[in-house]
């Protein structure tokens, strides 16, 4: 299972492919969510704020929490076949960065996200919350091997564009393509590994002001998602 917290996030959960197992709400949050819960086939518990805090063990100030089933994991091959623009993540284990990246992916039309081994769990509670629940709408799958997984992405017809401060070309100079594109990003600090960079077709950098090396990974990814969108 996984946990969704807050009225807005639970609203996204109710509109997603994931099955709700149960909800725990304050009376106020119940009154706000009641119309969306009318056809829900799951128990809904309503209790005062103090009871919610005692059950969860912390101040659940948003007054709403839900448990949902993860369901079957998506296969990378299915995601690759059905998409045209995807994000590929290496070493992304910061929960806030991952949540922000998924929110950006949803807002900028990314068809799916592939995670290399070692990335954080997209359904971790903080990731779900930071993404504002949008992680529940962006298909994601875990690559079984790395960096060999990049070979499978290339075999499916994707051009792999790696974002790196040491890139060979400026992102501004890349022409958006109607062909399949995979945006490859790494964790802040270490960035992409040499093995991953070797398998990229393009190594792109974002032009920066003097004295600034790079951007937050979710911000950098958002710039690439926007620039490389079909026109």
Image: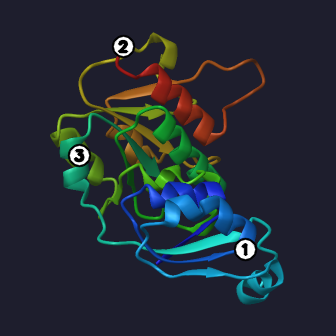
Residue, disc 1: 26
Q: Is residue 92 visible?
A: no
Q: Is residue 123 above or below residue 105?
A: below
Q: Is residue 101 visible?
A: yes
Mark number, residue 80:
3
**Circle nearer the viewer, 2 or 3:** 2
**Circle nearer the viewer, 3 or 1:** 1
Q: Quadrant of the C terminus?
A: top left
Which residue shows up at 73% across the image and 72% down it? Answer: 27
Upstream in sequence: badge 3 or badge 1? 1
Q: Secondary structure at mark 3?
A: helix
Q: Secondary structure at mark 2?
A: loop
Q: Position of residue 163 (x, y in %)?
A: 49, 33
Residue, disc 2: 231
**Circle nearer the viewer, 2 or 1:** 1
User: Residue 131 vs residue 53: left or right?
Assistant: left
Which residue shows up at 43% across the image and 70% down it? Answer: 40
Which residue shows up at 24% across the image and 34% down it? Answer: 158
Q: Quadrant of residue 202?
A: top left
Residues at circles 2 and 1 in contact by the CB criterion of under 8 Å: no
Q: Quadrant of residue 141?
A: bottom left
Upstream in sequence: badge 2 or badge 3? 3
Q: CA distance from mark 3 to mark 1?
A: 41 Å
Upstream in sequence: badge 2 or badge 1? 1
Q: CA distance from mark 2 to mark 3?
A: 21 Å
């Amino acid at each position: 299972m996984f946990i969704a917290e807050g009225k807005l996030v639970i609203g996204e959960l109710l509109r997603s492919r994931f099955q709700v197992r149960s909800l725990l709400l304050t009376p106020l949050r119940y009154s706000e969510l009641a119309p969306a819960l009318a056809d829900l086939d799951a128990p809904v518990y309503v209790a005062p704020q103090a009871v919610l805090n005692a059950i969860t063990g912390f101040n659940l100030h948003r007054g709403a929490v839900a448990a949902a089933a993860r369901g079957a994991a998506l296969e990378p091959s299915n995601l690759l076949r059905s998409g045209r623009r995807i994000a590929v993540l290496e070493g992304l284990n910061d929960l806030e960065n991952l949540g922000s990246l998924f929110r950006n992916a949803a807002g900028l039309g990314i068809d799916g996200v592939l995670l290399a081994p070692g990335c954080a769990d997209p359904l971790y509670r903080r990731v779900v919350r930071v993404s504002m629940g949008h992680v529940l709408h962006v298909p994601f799958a875990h690559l079984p091997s790395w960096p060999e997984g990049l070979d499978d992405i290339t075999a499916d017809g994707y051009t792999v564009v790696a974002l790196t401060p040491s890139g060979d070309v400026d992102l501004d100079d890349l022409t958006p393509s109607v062909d399949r594109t995979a945006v490859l990003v790494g964790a802040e600090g270490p960035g992409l590994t040499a093995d991953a960079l070797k398998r990229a077709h393009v190594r792109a950098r974002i032009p920066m002001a003097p004295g600034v090396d790079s951007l937050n990974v979710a911000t950098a990814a958002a710039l690439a998602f926007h620039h490389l969108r079909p026109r």
